[in-house]
Amino acid sequence: MKPLGSFRVVELGIGPVTGLAGMVLADFGAEVIKVNPVAGDPFADMPSSNLWLRGKKQISVDLNEPSQVSELRELILQTSDAVITTLSTAERTKLRLDNETLRESRSDLVIGAVSGFGERGPLADYPGYEGLVAAKSGRMMDFSGIVDREGPVYSALQVGVHASSQSLAAGLLAALENRTRTGHGHTFHTSLLRGMMPYEMGVVSVPQLRGRGLMKAAPPQRVRIKRMPTFNYHPVPTKDNRWLQFGNLLPHLLDNYFRVMGFKKLFTEERYKGDPLTWDPEDQEQIRDEMFEAMQTRDLQDWMDIYVKEGSVAAHPYQSSQEALSDPDIVDNKHVVETQTGKQLGLVANLLKTPGKVEEVSEPVALTSLMGRPLQIPRKTTPTKPSKPLEGVTVVESAAIIAAPLGASTLADLGARVIKIEPPTGDPFRSMSRGVGAAKCNTGKESICLDLKSPHGQKVAQQLATKADIWIHNYRVGVPEKLGIGYDQLSSINEKLVYISANGYGPNGPGAKRPSTHPIPGAALGGVVWQIGGLPDTSRKLSNQEIRETARTLLSSNDVNPDPNTSMVIATTATLGLCIQRLTGTGQKIFVDMFGANAYANWDDFLSYENKPERPQVDKLAFGLSPLYRLYECESSWVFLGVVSDKEKQKLETHFGLDLQSEDLAEQLSGVFRQKHASEWEAELIKQGIGCVRADENSTVQFFLESEQARADQLLVPAEHAEWGSYMRLGPMVEFDAENSYPGASLAGDSTHSLLSELGYSSQQIEEFETSGVIRAA
């Protein structure tokens, strides 16, 4: 039987968010029934639709025809386990497909909804397009400075779609796992706006801390385009004028790079001691020039051969998403598969015992042909429904920095108990950026500081494994075994363990044992190239000053998103593995990596087939993709216009009296928008059903802290921090119950003693461990 073959999911939604979430389940054998309007999914003309329609049974239902709606309701109530939908609460209530009506007959049913801006608040009825959500929530203001002009900058990569689709899948899988375990159904909601939350790296806490005098004001920051990259994250050209991106975040990785390059004086001369940021500015620029010259002595592939052989330098070429389809690490880890129509994005994760399979897009079938499926309603084993689906699930995380820790925190928000193992010195991310990013990535956890290089530390970790349902680590291949926490070691004492290896490149291919940090997949998977409007010019050698300018542009466009992109996939993978474990009774080893996760984030262009349209280009000044989907300057302000459907285009054409086929449409619209303030345009056009929002009103942090929408949709929730006291943190990616509470961030070692006591260690043994350095407590 297929891994998820016992589940039937009705996908009552249009477009890629429910499409991608349903695809994840279909890839692992769930029977996903895609419900289309009679005229078809209006987003089916997207070049990527073959991707998110694959493996599903498609039916057509006229939601204006009561008899067909009645048949759909019967299909759901009599044959299905879950529903995911883009229909609003009002639409579902009108059709008697709302949560209350459906669950009145089927309390075990799982129902997940997704919207643009959320189901509550003043923006609830705004058109839910990625560009509108990114602009209104401040993401495009966060990108200001990437190009050399004033105002917000279009953010190309569709992180909202990626994060919300993965969260929808994770919420659905978590709820199905809970249903299997307890017999109870769940309802939940997420949104594109919540999909923006993973990319805010804890900075919402900064104004709160400064307001209490717990953090000093930071010195003014230079405009992003004017800032030089640090040496560890530097883009550089090679002899053949192609560009490499480095990602040597930690000091030992940067030292490895300098050693490989033969920069011996950096290790012998006093002026180069310590962090390069503390060097004399003239010395920094001299080394930068020497680095440029050295890198241009070999072609790009020659350098990559050296770095792969050396194994401890994080570097990768800049390439487009189409070029990434042939990247050896992508191919060798099966992140791209061959279908009847061409190449396509592979599976979300590599489950070794219960692998998934990419199926083709099927022809539509009649709804009536799907009736009669025997429904097995699980027996209720608990008298009351858990408020969060992963209550009773234990996760052990042995990981650092952002990707895996944030993924584990997402599981904590779903109700899991998460135990974080970190070294006695703590997760190194805790000492970066004043710890605010680490606070975000470690909410809802119990921390134990263990020396995993010691026999006693390894024994404690293995004892924790006996209590765990899920284990997540982000070590490179071969390292867990040296620390006593390899899959074979842990599964021998807990055969039901879902063991997730989340590293940079995956277990196969040239990058298998190499390090990776966020700029690497940003450069390698096509996100940066899309953001800057194409690859840098390779036709000539640049001067050092030109290299500086191009490097600034590349790195300032290389947003931190690859880490959170991976976090969302890790959360999906964990719930997928756990759900399959509940069905089969066995655990397994699962591989997920930053390259595969960021291929998913580039879902719109990670496929190829004959006559496939090219990915629409971002213009060189980063206004947007087209005259109807871009930023416009207004009277001392900016708007983002997002007009997609034919109906919206007709409304815009009527409202402005413009010919939308005109070659100078962007110029005409620019003239119109300059006549009023952005807030006036938003109020006027939204009232007409035209997507238009002010784009320069706030940063992301200001939006989440101050906007009425954030308050109304509870995007911020109260929490406690051991050192900060009460504070407001960003809420869950998936909201199951508006009354739920969410814990704050853990401190390194804050639960060391309590966890050891829980494992049966005496006070004397704990004291001996602490004295010998095996453990550390907060």
Image (cartoon, rainbow, N blue to C red):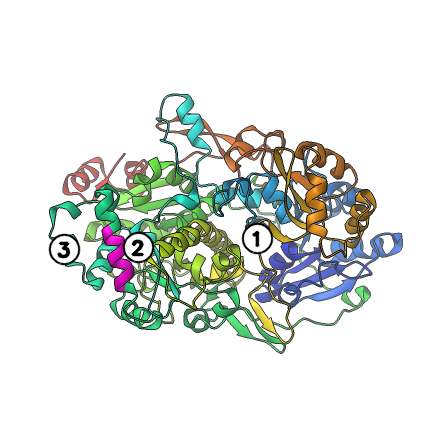
User: In front of the other: label 1 or label 3?
Assistant: 3
Q: Position of residue 189 (x, y in %)?
A: 63, 43
What kind of residue is marked 2? Asn
Residue receiving disc 2: 248
- Work out how far the residue at label 2 is from the one at label 1, CA to CA, in angstroms: 26 Å
Q: Position of residue 719 (x, y in %)?
A: 46, 30
Assess disc 3: are there few (<14), some (14-19) or many (≥20) residues with their C-alpha within 10 Å of its C-alpha.
few
- Sooner in the amino-acid sequence: mark 2 or mark 1: 1
Compared to residue 744, the image places residue 395 above or below, namely below
Question: Which of pointers 1 and 3 lies earlier in the amino acid sequence?
Answer: 1
- The residue pinned by badge 3 equals 265
Position of 167 with respect to 292 (left or right) is right
Q: In which image quadrant can residue 118 be found? A: top right
Mark 1 highlights which residue?
Answer: 158
Q: Is residue 398 magenta?
A: no
Q: Amino acid at mark 3?
A: Lys
Mark 1 residue type: Gln
Up/down of 256 relative to 325, above or below: above
- Magenta stretch: give its range: 286-294
| Residue drawn at point x = 14 percent, y = 55 percent | 265
* Mark nearer the N terminus (3 vs 2): 2
Q: CA distance from mark 3 to mark 2?
A: 19 Å
Give the left or right position of residue 54, taking residue 464 as reference: right
Q: Residue shown at 50%/42% (left/top)?
A: 144
Q: CA distance from mark 1 to mark 3?
A: 44 Å
Q: Secondary structure at mark 2?
A: loop
